[in-house]
Amino acid sequence: AVFSRVGYGEATAEAIAREAGMSKATFYEHFDNKEDCIVSLFDTAIDVILGAMRAAGERSIDADPVERVRASAEAFLAALEQFPDEAQTLLVEIIGAGPRAMARRDRALDAVAQYIDELNRRDHERGAAPRFASPHDAFAIAGAVVELASRQIRTGRPANISELEPVVERLTMGLLADGP
């Protein structure tokens, strides 16, 4: 909540501890500094989001690729909508939190891209979709979706984050249409 409200740069260990209902000493028992705190929050948030996406993907594993893309996108966007403070931290504030946080962000984007590529590989193997034209296609989707969501969180456009789902679907299916 503190990172979301005042931004990473203005957040303090004292404010975070106060918001969490703990002493500053207790904060330092868990974290060396606010960077450790935001990285820990980021790691937890990405686990929740990837878990929601994987669960949605597994529930629709034999479905048409369009339906599974829709289900995974809806799961991603719903998780962001359900946890707005964490979404702000995950997608916006993490960028200013230093090199260690950016490395975590890069690994998270890679993990999302690997998941997207894995689903595409499965679809291709069962004859349901063409294979991506490039190994970078899955990363392009992950990066574009993160930027779309980040922009919505920062600007409130569109008004509801779930309005991005059709855009994600068109983006993904458009890259598949241009496959080899």
Image: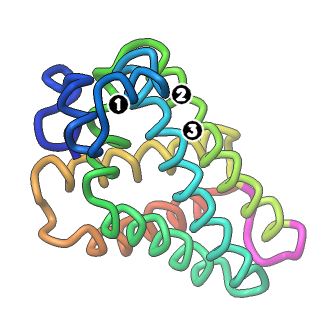
Identify the residue shown where x is 33% and y is 26%: 95
Q: Which residues are magenta?
A: 125-131
Disc 3: CA contacts within 10 A as few (<14), some (14-19) or many (>=20):
some
The x, y position of residue 71, in whole percent, is: 54, 79
Circle 3 residue? 108
Q: Is residue 126 magenta?
A: yes
How are the colours assigned in the image?
Answer: rainbow
Per the image, the residue denoted by label 2 is 104
User: CA separation, marks 1 and 3?
Assistant: 12 Å
Q: Quadrant of residue 43?
A: top right
Which residue is depicted at the point 49% across and 16% down? 100
112 or 35: nearer the viewer: 35
Residues packed near mark 2 inside 10 Å, few (<14), some (14 to 19) or many (20 plus): some
Q: Earlier in the sequence, mark 1 or mark 3?
A: 1
Q: Nearer the viewer, residue 163 or 2?
A: 2
Q: Position of residue 81 (x, y in %)?
A: 31, 67
Give left or right: position of 24 versus 123: left
Residue at x 26% of width, y 52% of height: 85
Question: Magenta-highlighted stretch: main secondary structure?
Answer: loop
Question: How far is the residue under mark 1 from the one under mark 2?
Answer: 9 Å
Residue 177 lies left or right of residue 82; in this view the side is right
Q: Are marks 1 and 2 in contact (CB under 8 Å)?
A: yes
The amino acid type, in three-letter code, at marker 3 is Ala
Per the image, label 2 sits on a secondary structure element best described as helix
- Please, what is the three-letter code of the amino acid marked with disc 1? Ile
SS for callout 1: helix
> Could you tell me which residue is drawn at 39 percent across and 31 percent down?
38
* Mark 2: amino acid: Arg
Where 179 falls versus 63 (above or below)? above
Mark 1 Cα within 10 Å, few/some/many (few <14, many 20+)? many
